[in-house]
Amino acid sequence: MKHTSEYCKQLTCQNCSLRERTEWANLKEDELNLLNKHKVAKPFVSGDVLFNQQDVNSGVYCVHSGLVGLRHYDAGGNAILIKTANPGDTVGYRSFLKKSNHSISAEILSPSVICVISPSIVRQLLKKSPDLGLRFLEHSLNDLDEMEKRYIQARSWSAKSRFLHTLMVFREQESAAYAKDSMHFDLPVTRQELASMIGITPEAMSRLVRNVKDEGLVEISGRQVHIPDIDKVADQLQLAS
Amino acid sequence: MKHTSEYCKQLTCQNCSLRERTEWANLKEDELNLLNKHKVAKPFVSGDVLFNQQDVNSGVYCVHSGLVGLRHYDAGGNAILIKTANPGDTVGYRSFLKKSNHSISAEILSPSVICVISPSIVRQLLKKSPDLGLRFLEHSLNDLDEMEKRYIQARSWSAKSRFLHTLMVFREQESAAYAKDSMHFDLPVTRQELASMIGITPEAMSRLVRNVKDEGLVEISGRQVHIPDIDKVADQLQLAS
DNA sequence: CGTCTGGTTGATCTAGATCAACAGGAGTGG
DNA sequence: CCACTCCTGTTGATCTAGATCAACCAGACG
């Protein structure tokens, strides 16, 4: 059974199938052993919090399975979901490197197994492995590119385009993870969360879902998504960009 | 006279007053000499283009004086001004490090002197100086923080709040550069550009300026800005965040 | 002198927010 | 088993910030 403490204990970095995609890909054997020895793999359930906005950094978190949401709260308590982190993603590295407080919260969105790595271990590894530093640089540059893209889309795309685009991203992630028929996949988040991601209200999300169904673009029932005509969707996004 | 080729020729990295704030702050003497020998300081006028979106990287650009706008064009030709680069800022480093094409264009917004540094020199310096790599990492993390902030503001602040906030940022930059009376300063860009920065149309900008004047928050005539009551402005921004 | 660019003003339109009511599970407790 | 309450989602009515379209103005500049 996944998501139990017992299952977590037997996980090792050495034969972690996701390692290739993480910052830890090029660690040498002894470095990998150090990482494995001190990482703590833990099961989490939806609603758990890895860290809160403005907390001091307490390590980096490597997502092994499940889904993590990075959320920002403003002074009025309104939240927006900035992005999600999938298996293979490392979160919390920014405030670790900047030695600053977290600018956003990390919350578990679906049952997950996360490896927690303490700051001191990452520091040790950074001293040993020059490649690790480069990996973090790369990660930061990629995140910056993505953030810029999201900023541009938030400003110049319609809610519908942002919605369809987000669905396409989910589709890629889901099919990469489970190699399913890519015209059918499940939403990894509730519609409310999805609404918060693309920056509209749940009510607007509801109407949007109805509209795209009427237009024959996307059919959604419950969490299941079906794309009857992928080209039609691609066309829509073409116009937007 | 500033902004002439002659003026540019006598500029040296060694006694550049801005160096402290740049990535090149901690270079050793021989590294600094290498940089100085190969940097090319050039005058630019408004409308000049340092690089275009999707161009391959051709070096990094260190702003010595003036103002550079980083702009994104979508498929329909609509542009949005993503941010501005001020004296001491380095632009074009992202695509250099990622060895990818530029995701945005860099255009001169006011007469500027820019030092152009070829990729091969930066590569050499990166090999010699481990600190330089760290500086770039830091820069990338800061840009990421800023981009995230702008994204959040674009999504959850009103146009008025974004406008006031941008004015406050300009105020800081202007008074830092010229140590003027901080309640009076000049807009570094046209109102159209400002509108493009905060994500509204020029018409909306015009009305916004009138509104804040009526409310006694900010007075603008031509390029001159006057803040009669800074606390009032701060209060407005307090509510927004 | 006409033409361009930057800015202003007014009239109208619209995407999406807001407010309010309601419906269908999924627990939970008696 | 029913009653109760969450929680997610749906629908309708209304409101509003800001876009869009169109006309116009003032200064710069060949």
Image (cartoon, coloured by chain):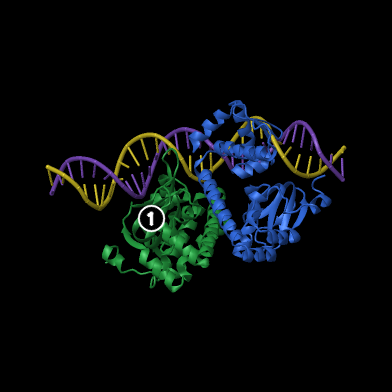
Chain colours: A green, B blue, C yellow, D purple
Mark 1 secondary-structure assignment: loop
Report whether residue B114 is seen. yes
Question: How many numbered marks appear?
Answer: 1
Give the chain letter at badge 1: A
Quarter where residue B61 is shown: bottom right
Which residue is label 1 attached to?
Answer: A189
Q: Residue at x 64, y 35 (%)?
A: B206
The image position of residue B162, as x and y in percent, is 56, 39
The image position of residue A200, as x and y in percent, is 46, 46
Q: Which residue is drawn at 71% across and 35% down?
A: B223
Asked if residue A192 is positioned above or below residue A216 in the image, the reply reads above
What type is the residue that disc 1 sits on? Answer: Val
Given residues B96 and A70, the one toward you in this image is B96
Q: Which residue is drawn at 69% across and 66% down?
A: B120
Q: Which residue is drawn at 69% across and 64% down?
A: B121
Quarter where residue A74 is shown: top left
Given residues A152 and B164, the one toward you in this image is B164
